[in-house]
Amino acid sequence: MQYLVTGGSGFIGSNIVRTLLTRGENVRVLDNFSTGKRENIYSLLDNPNLQLIEGDLRSFHIVRNAVKDVDYILHQGALPSVPRSINDPITTNDVNILGTLNILEAAREMGIKRVVYASSSSVYGNSEKLPKTEDMPISPLSPYALSKYTAERYCQLYSQLYGLETVCIRYFNVFGPYQDPTSQYSAVIPKFIRLIAAGERPVIFGDGLQSRDFTFVANNVEANLLAAKAPGIGGDVFNIACGERYTLLDLVDLINKIMGTNIEPIFAESRAGDVKHSMAGIDKAKRLMGYTANTKFEAGLRQTVAFFCPKASV
Ligand SMILES: NC(=O)c1ccc[n+]([C@@H]2O[C@H](COP(=O)([O-])OP(=O)(O)OC[C@H]3O[C@@H](n4cnc5c(N)ncnc54)[C@H](O)[C@@H]3O)[C@@H](O)[C@H]2O)c1
């Protein structure tokens, strides 16, 4: 089978590419390296089953070429940060919405088997109700969240109007190898691992009791592959996570335990707009896609620490 992975040099995309190549599939990557890194897929580039197209999702012409002769599209390419979208809503809108529309339109034209779209738990907004299930009201609170939701609706519209099979999977706080620890928009886990490894104290905004459904990236990779093939789920939306939640204090404790360190966090004032707790209901994905979160939080964190600091992990 020929897969197109958009954003294939990014964190989640490069993990998908690696797994697909290991399984002997043919993979094409479309990426403009704006937030993704060449190094993430550098070691894979001499694999004859991998083809790299450097190009922008915002160009229909480029997208159309990338989609040619593809069976499945795993659409990860996006500008993935909430603060970035607040600073620059127009670019987020262009990449995340127009980029997705280009993918859908090219997929419709080329008769692609299925488009899997990487959506986000941010579409649920600030609701305190847990677990978050797919039938809950949608309340995007940032240009990023709104762009992810709008692109979801485009996916569903293309299924309804044109019969193109699309499946939207909403990720919750993904972590693992190849996640960028250095950007100002970096997620908390790679950032904390890096700081603790350097003997520095990570900053927690608030009391540290805020909790998240931290999900090891291998679970998201598996979910993409299931979403591409599971029968009868075209046009639908699924949460993908572990269905468990851990606080930031748990996270710091566990990193210290794994690395054999004893670094205390620094507490700063909580940030406006941060959700206190988040946890996914994953029953629908279990039932209709056969999804299970095979790698739990601690096992995933051990693999992540081993990736970022091979000498520190015990
Ligand atoms: N990481 C998470 O916790 C998380 C949570 C929810 C949803 N998501 C979604 O998962 C997907 C992957 O996120 P990630 O964490 O791997 O982020 P990432 O930034 O590492 O990956 C995004 C990739 O898209 C590429 N890209 C950006 N703009 C592009 C453009 N105009 N043309 C071509 N390529 C472009 C980037 O270069 C990068 O390789 C995104 O769609 C994101 O919204 C991620």
Image (cartoon, helix red, strand yellow):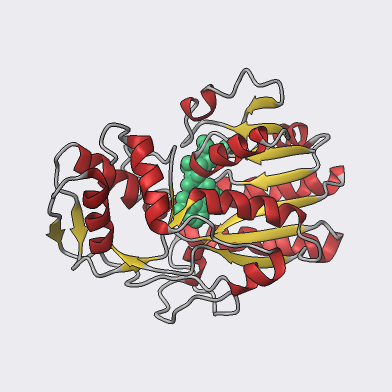
Q: As drawn, which residue projects farthest toward the top?
A: 46
- Residue 151: x %, y % from top left: 63, 58
As drawn, is 237 to the left or to the right of 40? right
Q: Measuring 54% from the left and 40% from the top, which residue is drawn there?
A: 15
Q: Can I make out residue 232 in this image?
A: yes
> Which is more toward the observer, 194 or 296?
296
Q: Measuring 47% from the left and 25% from the top, which residue is drawn there?
A: 39
Which picture quadrant has residue 212? bottom left
- The quarter of the rendered structure image containing the C terminus is top left
> Which is more toward the observer, 12 or 115?
12
Which picture quadrant has residue 193? top left
- The quarter of the rendered structure image containing the N terminus is top right
Q: Examine the rendered structure and indicate whether residue 131 appears above or below residue 166.
A: below
Q: Can I make out residue 79 in this image?
A: no
- Residue 38: x %, y % from top left: 50, 26
- Residue 220: x %, y % from top left: 56, 53
Which picture quadrant has residue 184? top left
Q: As drawn, which residue projects farthest toward the bottom?
A: 129
- Residue 117: x %, y % from top left: 65, 54
Q: Examine the rendered structure and indicate whether residue 221 appears above or below residue 28.
A: below
Q: Measuring 76% from the left and 65% from the top, which residue is drawn there?
A: 233
